[in-house]
Amino acid sequence: MNVLLDDNPIEVEDQSLAAAMSAGVEIAQREGRAVIEVLIDGKAVRGEELIDASTEPIPGAKVELFTANPVELVGQSLRDAAGALESARSSHADIASRLQAGSDTAEALSQLSGTLSVWQGVQDVLARGYALLGRDPSTLDLPDEVAGGKTLNTLIQELGEQLREVRRSLEDHDLAALADTIGYELEPLAGVWAGVLSHAAGAITQS
């Protein structure tokens, strides 16, 4: 098995993906970096295969591991999420308008699915990003012009409440309540959270 870390060969204890990843992660951590991509014979390893790496021997395989500076990686991920949320902000009003009109409900719900995926990404990138850096996101100090005097924990709680209301409205087929939540609650929150993520990216890279 040929194992490369950022195109440099490394030694592993046995010929398995688990061993290759263990050796690669250890070296990366010593150098202040994080493994961000793993390939076996040119094919990306993802999901459960990455989380629970196999201990089965794969002799003759080429395993490539690629690393990145974790601070730069998390900062860029936060900026990307902020941009995605800002881009999706206008869709909230469009979805609400379609639901209120009742003339294009199927299209509105399809559009809503994509918007909710953006919101899910916002929560994931913040939690996983800070976890990767070994930091607590609740310590993030938000300026009043970004968060209106609210703490990150308060904003997370508010977002959770609104997303739960979206799910309730969908389950109950309450399109009027759904339109109100999307248009009057989540739309302004999108602007707030775009600012929060951008601020978090700057705070991480400057600390």
Image (tube, grey):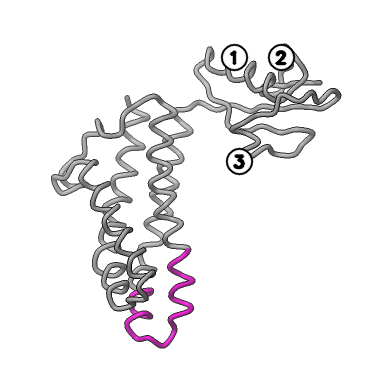
What are the residue bounds of the magenta stretch?
94-113
Q: Residue at x 59, y 14 (%)?
A: 27
Residue 94, relative to residue 11: is it above or below? below
What element does badge 1 sit on? helix
Pick the quarter of the image with the N terminus. Answer: top right
Residues at discs 2 and 1 in contact (Cβ within 8 Å): yes
Residue type indicated by callout 2: Ile
What element does badge 3 sit on? loop
Q: Residue at x 38, y 49 (%)?
A: 82
Q: Which residue is mark 3?
A: 47
Query: What separation in Å lies between label 3 and label 1 (alpha carbons)?
Result: 22 Å
| Mark 3 or mark 2, whichever is nearer to me | 3
Q: Residue at x 23, y 48 (%)?
A: 155
Q: Nearer the viewer, residue 157 or 92?
A: 157
| Residue neighbourhood size for the residue with mark 2, other residues' Cα within 10 Å, grouped as few (<14), some (14–19), many (≥20) | some
Disc on the earlier residue, 2 or 1: 2
What element does badge 2 sit on? loop
Residue type indicated by callout 1: Ile
Q: Which residue is mark 1?
A: 27
The quadrant where residue 153 appears? top left
